[in-house]
Amino acid sequence: MDAQTQQDLFEYTLRLGDDALTLGHRISEWTSKAPFLEEDIALGNIGLDFVGRARLLLTYAGEVENLGRDEDQLAYLRDIRQYRNLLICELPIGNFADTMARQLLVDAFELPYFQALSQSSDRTLAGIAGKAVKEAQYHLRHSSGWVVRLGDGTEESHGKMADALSKVWGYGPEMFITDEVEQRLVDAGIAVQREELRDGWQAQIERVLEEATLAVPDVSWQVDGGRRGEHTEYLGHMLAEMQFMQRAYPGLQW
Amino acid sequence: MSDHKLPLFEVFIRSRRGLDHKHVGSLHAQDHEAALGYARDVYTRRNEGVSIWVVKSEDIVASQEHEAESFYDPMDDKVYRHASFYEVPDEVKHM
């Protein structure tokens, strides 16, 4: 592997790892606070899927980087500007409708994304993606089921679901940006071209929203920056809590 | 949201192929599909199952304690119904 590809692959794996880690941590914040016991356990399970994926990806990122950093060092000892996740993954959990709206946008993207990545010429990424596909199928069934139930529910649940979708909608487009780092890896048969997934994603979301009697949000703004380390005001607070233990007791092991 | 409006479901899990589904517990869910999902999350976290059934608890008809005498006592004096005198071959499992 040449130096450029190695550097790109590290960056790419870090991005996917940070997506999984930040979103997994956010979902874990529901633990003990979900609307009812069964949903609490379901969300805990989903959060663990993401954290498990983050561990695999960050471990691999450390191997590719080859500077001796392991998953814990990458997760707990990087500052906010070094985090590479999509902004949508770091948003606060909000209310239950907010969480389901975010999850629907992400799950509907991740399923075809990881299906495509499971064909990557990088066998480690292909293996991780193959595992992620099975998880994403379940996640999408879970989130779309809730969006339909809340959208096609009471007047109050419909209103909250519509509000949640319009708040998160502008964070969706960032998922479809393929910058030069990822484009070089696409050309090498390693990464997935994100733009190509947009139409299928849009159609999938529209099917769910139609069944939920919800309109596609009429939102013209969109934001990005996570891949460059430019984050929302929320990530710093999340990292402060997530990284506290390793910062206070460096090198702490279970 | 409170859970007391959600219907109760009974969960049955088959732990291995060739075995019967066994009742493992119950849970609340908004519908059958969600009940299957929750059953997967609550009762198969450690690979306990290969198949799950969920049934609305209200759809189960149960025998009553006070009917036990009329239900079961007439069987007491019919020992000839027991296959007590057959030996089960070693090859037959799960009897």
Image (tube, coloured by chain):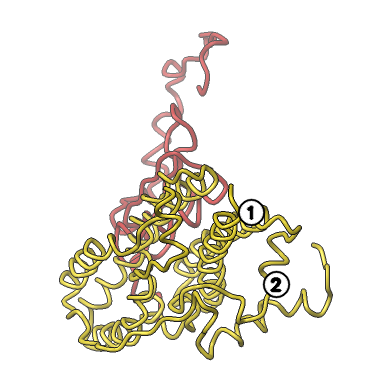
Q: Indicate the position of residue A248 as horizontal and vertical percent values.
A: 81, 80
Chain ID at mark 2: A
Q: Position of residue A157 (x, y in %)?
A: 28, 84
User: Which residue is the site of mark 1?
Assistant: A64
Taking the spot 18% from the left edge, 66% from the top edge, the residue there is A207
Residue type marked 1: Val
Q: Which amino acid, mark 2?
A: Tyr
Q: Identify the residue under disc 2.
A: A76
Instruction: Decide if residue B2 is on the left or right side of residue A23.
Output: left
Q: Which chain is red?
A: B
Q: Up-down: is B55 above or below B83?
A: below
* Badge 2: residue crowd in 10 Å (few <14, some 14–19, many ≥20): some
**Foreground residue, A36 or A232?**
A232
Do circles 2 and 1 both sit on a common chain? yes
Query: In x, y percent, where is residue A226?
Result: 49, 78
Secondary-structure class at tag 2 = helix
The answer to which of A42 and A76 lies nearer the viewer is A76
Quarter occupied by residue A196: bottom left
